[in-house]
């Protein structure tokens, strides 16, 4: 059973829970946290105890002298970072008493983390819709645009989460890649393999590493069906149907076939970290979600309204608008 936070959602952001050791070389909880968060000013952290901002499971405030072992968990609000505004709007495509389906722009993370707090899909939607219990049922990378599904009520959340865990949601993506070297429109093949292509490999997520590793010696744990939509003299436009959900799977699979996605700073080569260039979004879009509703048994289908700006012209449908760039917020 999930542990309920003693602190309410504030400005769309839930409190952070920290699991503490019950014993160790630290005399107080404050001393442990000062060492755990060594990158923070220790006196500033301890002052948060003085202000009653760090609380126990029952909501009672701790002091800087509360001994280690007195509590196993504490809760607190993250101090808002100085954020760079993500100047693109998230759009709500569907809302009912159980689900919210949103169309996420590129550059906006799904949930708060790192440099982003208010500039996350979850926080923006909680504030926009006034639903503090809103929770994402799955994730999209910050760099990826398209469909995101959120749960409204804790009572029905598990049923929708199981859809994704049991791979009972059909997910369709689109990607645009630079035209691979040696591309022959007559044969329409990648790495010598004609479309449609089923690509499999073993993807391993490494701790403290922004990229994943492919282990060719191990049994595949990821699979993607790749279909050709269109190609011109510049780019290749593909439809991707993942049958698994490994980190960066679609980016890794296309890169392995010599068709790395346009504007990908991770694959096939990790580029030096640089500020976001809002004019050059990753050309990857979560286009469609289909599933049988676990509560009603009805067939559900959602389609993004976004397109990829680098896609060949024939693939752009007039009823759709570009995924990027969009008018800045407040313009």
Image (cartoon, rainbow, N blue to C red):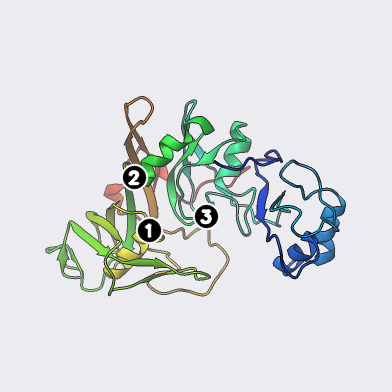
Task: Work out how far the residue at label 3 is from the one at label 1, CA to CA, in angstroms.
Answer: 20 Å
Residue placed farthest to the left in the image?
186
Q: Can residue 123 be seen in this view?
A: yes
Identified at 56% across, 69% down, the residue is 274
Of the residues under marks 1 and 2, which one precedes in the sequence?
2
Residue 97 in the image: above or below residue 192: above
Asked if 194 appears above or below 157 in the picture, the reply is below
The disc label shown at residue 246, or none: 1
Residue depth check, mark 2 versus mark 3: number of the one nearer the observer: 2
Q: Give the SS element for disc 3.
A: loop
Neighbour class for label 2 at 10 Å: few (<14), some, many (≥20)?
A: few
Q: Does the CB distance between marks 3 and 1 fall below 8 Å?
A: no
Label 3 belongs to which residue? Answer: 107
Q: Where is residue 314 in the image (x, y as percent from the top left)?
A: 27, 48
Q: Residue 166 carries which label?
A: 2
Q: Is residue 258 above or below residue 53?
A: below
């Amino acid at each position: 059973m999930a542990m309920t936070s003693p602190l309410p959602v504030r400005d769309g952001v839930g409190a952070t829970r920290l699991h503490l050791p019950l014993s160790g070389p630290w005399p107080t909880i404050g001393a442990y946290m000062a060492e755990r968060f060594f990158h923070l000013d220790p006196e500033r952290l301890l002052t948060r105890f003085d202000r009653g901002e760090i609380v126990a499971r029952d909501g009672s405030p701790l002091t800087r002298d509360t001994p280690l072992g007195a509590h196993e968990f504490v809760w607190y609000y993250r101090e808002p970072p100085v954020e760079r505004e993500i100047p693109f709007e998230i759009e709500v495509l569907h809302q009912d008493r159980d689900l919210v389906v949103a169309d996420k722009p590129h550059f906006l993370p799904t949930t708060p983390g790192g440099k982003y707090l208010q500039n996350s899909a979850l926080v923006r939607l909680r504030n926009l819709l006034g639903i503090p219990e809103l929770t994402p049922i799955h994730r999209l990378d910050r760099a990826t645009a398209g469909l995101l599904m959120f749960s409204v009520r804790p009572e029905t959340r598990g049923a929708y989460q199981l859809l994704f865990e049991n791979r009972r949601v059909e997910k369709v993506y689109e990607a645009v890649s630079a035209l691979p070297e040696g591309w022959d429109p007559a044969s329409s093949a990648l790495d010598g393999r004609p479309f449609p292509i089923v690509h499999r490999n073993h993807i391993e997520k490494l701790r403290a590493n922004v990229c994943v590793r492919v282990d060719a010696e191990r049994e595949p744990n990821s699979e993607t069906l790749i279909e050709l939509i269109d190609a011109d003299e510049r780019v290749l436009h593909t439809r991707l149907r993942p049958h698994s959900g490994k980190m960066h799977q679609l980016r890794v699979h296309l890169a392995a076939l010599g068709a790395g996605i346009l504007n990908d700073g991770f694959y096939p080569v990790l580029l030096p970290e640089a500020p976001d260039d809002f004019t050059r979004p990753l050309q990857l879009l979560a286009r469609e979600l289909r599933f049988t509703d676990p509560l009603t048994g009805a067939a559900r289908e959602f389609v993004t309204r976004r397109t990829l700006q680098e896609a060949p012209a024939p693939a752009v449908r007039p009823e759709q608008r570009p995924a990027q760039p969009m008018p800045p917020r407040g313009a």
